[in-house]
């Protein structure tokens, strides 16, 4: 079977009829917190952390400012989900019984961060599968407890990454908020989202992380 034949046959089971779309739209609007769809984009920030791994391995030291910024962005999406599910911060509680110790060796640290990211990809993928596909598209009964467990798992791995890198999760939260205050002093606008003063934003992250420069010596 060639590619064109496959596409034509595959889309046969992609129901995009007006009637089906109306049912899905109603399901989305009436039964589920719509911001959970937005929260599913956390996987894009995890992807950026994989890019951080690649850059760090390519040469030079570890860009701790970038690391703190990107993990902070992960926490932002979890905060959106927490608010949508009315959890009052429970999703973002970092409660490992024994927090991991800081890892000094660069190769060992990057390997550990990569392992955490792989677990985060699995968790975020399961979140998207449950919310977007099974709940919205298939009409499976909505179970927020399943979603909460997945989101909390992502947060735990984010906290581990920070602890192993020598940061506290509270620093990442503060760095993220300070960065966003610089970007959106009067709240979100599409224009400000597209026109960013990256250097100024990263300086806010560096201050919170007590980092004088962009890179450590590891």
Image: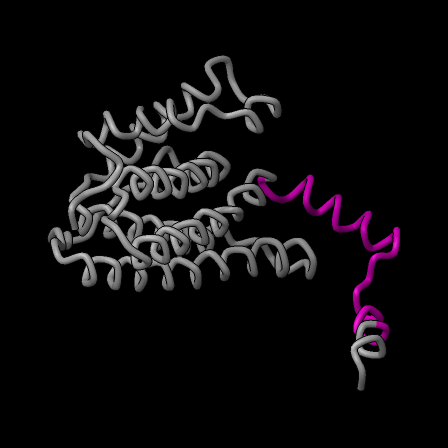
Q: Is residue 98 visible?
A: no
Residue 28 located left or right of residue 192: right
Q: Residue furthest bottom?
A: 1
Q: Nearer the viewer, residue 152 or 188?
A: 188
Q: Residue furthest top?
A: 186
Q: Can you say whether 30 is above or below 105 in the image?
A: above
Q: Does residue 25 show up magenta in the picture?
A: yes
Q: Can you say whether 33 is above or below 143 in the image?
A: above
Q: Position of residue 96 (x, y in %)?
A: 19, 52
Q: Can you say whether 158 is above or below 82 in the image?
A: below
Residue at (46% x, 22% y) in the render? 183
Q: Quadrant of the N terminus?
A: bottom right
Q: Position of residue 125 (x, y in %)?
A: 50, 60
How has the structure been colored for display?
one colour
Residue at (45% x, 47% y) in the render? 45
Where is residue 66, by image quadrant?
top left
Q: From which residue to which does the magenta span run? A: 8-33
Q: Position of residue 54 (x, y in %)?
A: 37, 58
Residue at (79% x, 73% y) in the render? 10
Q: Can you say whether 126 is above or below 42 in the image?
A: below
Residue 191 located left or right of residue 10: left
Residue 201 located left or right of residue 171: right
Q: Which secondary structure dominates the residues rendered in magenta? A: helix
């Amino acid at each position: 079977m060639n590619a064109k034949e496959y596409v034509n046959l595959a889309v046969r089971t992609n129901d995009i009829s007006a009637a089906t779309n109306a049912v899905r739209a109603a399901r989305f609007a009436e039964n589920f917190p719509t911001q959970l769809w937005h929260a599913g984009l956390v996987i894009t920030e995890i992807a950026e952390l994989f890019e951080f791994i690649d850059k760090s391995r390519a040469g030079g030291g570890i860009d701790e400012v970038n690391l703190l910024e990107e993990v902070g962005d992960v926490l932002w999406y979890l905060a959106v989900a927490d608010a949508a599910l009315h959890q009052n911060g429970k999703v973002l509680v970092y409660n490992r019984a024994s927090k991991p110790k800081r890892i000094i060796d660069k190769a060992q640290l990057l390997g550990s961060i990569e392992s955490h990211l792989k677990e985060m990809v699995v968790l975020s993928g399961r979140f998207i599968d449950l919310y977007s596909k099974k709940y919205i598209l298939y009409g499976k009964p909505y179970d927020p407890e399943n979603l909460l467990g997945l989101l909390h798992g992502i947060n735990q791995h984010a906290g581990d990454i920070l602890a192993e890198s020598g940061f506290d999760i509270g620093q990442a939260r503060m760095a993220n908020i300070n960065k966003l205050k610089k970007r959106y002093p009067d709240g979100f606008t599409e224009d400000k989202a597209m026109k960013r003063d990256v250097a100024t934003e990263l300086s806010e992250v560096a201050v919170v992380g007590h980092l004088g420069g962009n890179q450590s010596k590891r």
